[in-house]
Amino acid sequence: MDNRSFSSLSPLRRLTAAALLLCLGLILSYLERLSGIDALLPFPGAKIGLANLVTLFCLYFTDRKTAFLVLTLRVLLNSLLFSGFSAFLYGLFGGGFALLTMALLQKGWPGYFSFFGISIGGAAAHQLGQVLAAAILLKTGSVFHYLGWLWIGAILTGGAMGGIFSLLYPRLQRAVDWNK
Amino acid sequence: MKKTLRLGDFLITAILLFAALFLLFSPFRTTGEIVVVSADGVVIDQFPLQGDDQDFSYEEADFSFTLRRENGKVAMVQMDCPDQSCVKTGYISLSGSSIICLPNRVTVLVTGETEVDFVLG
């Protein structure tokens, strides 16, 4: 199954799939926070971004509309369940930038990027979005120099996520059958 | 299929790396002169980076925090927030460096200007 045939499924199947992916993304995000793994990274405020695996999955196994829907709802629910408005803004900017960049890299230059590049691009865009949100909330441009550290981290965490997804991909291709 | 590294991957990594190094190292050529403390986008204090070793404590509506100036550097030594990444940032002294507490919206910026009046947006 690939993402071309996803669009031809019934709306109910697509909705159910989206709901499942939404939950998966929320759980991954929660687990990441719960495990405290982010504290291991040397850069304050850096994240591994496990939930981006779901976004990657959406981009390769569903259609872009679903990817966008799952991302937006995940960010919304995440902030409603776990924190406040500023978390929503960060999540929206970060996740939104990440999704747009990953979709762009995936479709714009097919063949030039592997999962690693797309994942790194997504991580870097995610951080750019969050720094932008911080600049707006804090009303200062001084936050931008954190991007230096964050982007070095993006190369590492994006690469790690890309690696995880590339390991999962062949198994997902065999296991995912939307017609079940 | 998409497991091997490709040209775009290297390009994007190189671009990010260069951009990151530029962001980190180009404004940092001088030791800063003034420390600007802001809460919620509003400057609440400014003090010179040079001076006697001293603690600066601030009380805001929901939280309090303390900065320490020592040896021409400044660090956040105490902040009421669960995250504590601002405290983990440690000492800064170079112009353009900052310590930031996101949940409490506090920024501590080191600048080379003798008079600060910055606005963004």
Image (cartoon, helix red, strand yellow):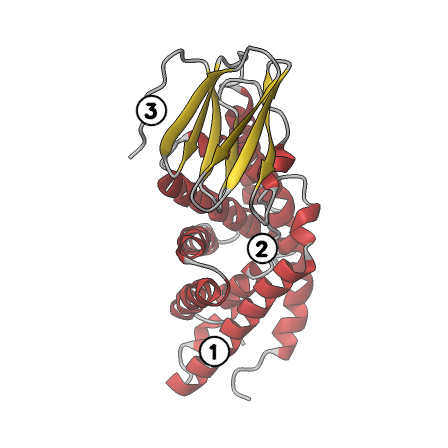
Q: Quadrant of the C terminus of chain A?
A: bottom right
User: Residue A73: x and y, percent?
Assistant: 42, 68
**Dot 3 crowding, Cα within 10 Å, few <14, some 14–19, many 20+:** few
Asked if residue A35 is positioned above or below residue B39 in the image, the reply reads below
Residue B10 occupies quadrant: top right
Q: Secondary structure at mark 3?
A: loop
Chain of the residue on which disc 3 is drawn: B
**Dot 1 crowding, Cα within 10 Å, few <14, some 14–19, many 20+:** some
Residue at figure coordinates x 40%, y 64% from the top left: A72
Chain of the residue on which disc 1 is drawn: A
Q: Secondary structure at mark 2?
A: loop
Q: Is residue A180 left or right of residue A31?
A: left
Q: Secondary structure at mark 1?
A: helix
Q: Nearer the viewer, mark 2 or mark 3?
A: 3
Q: Amino acid at mark 2?
A: Gly
Chain of the residue on which disc 2 is drawn: A
Q: Amino acid at mark 1?
A: Ala
Name the disc covering residue A32, or none. Answer: none
Residue at figure coordinates x 41%, y 87% from the top left: A12
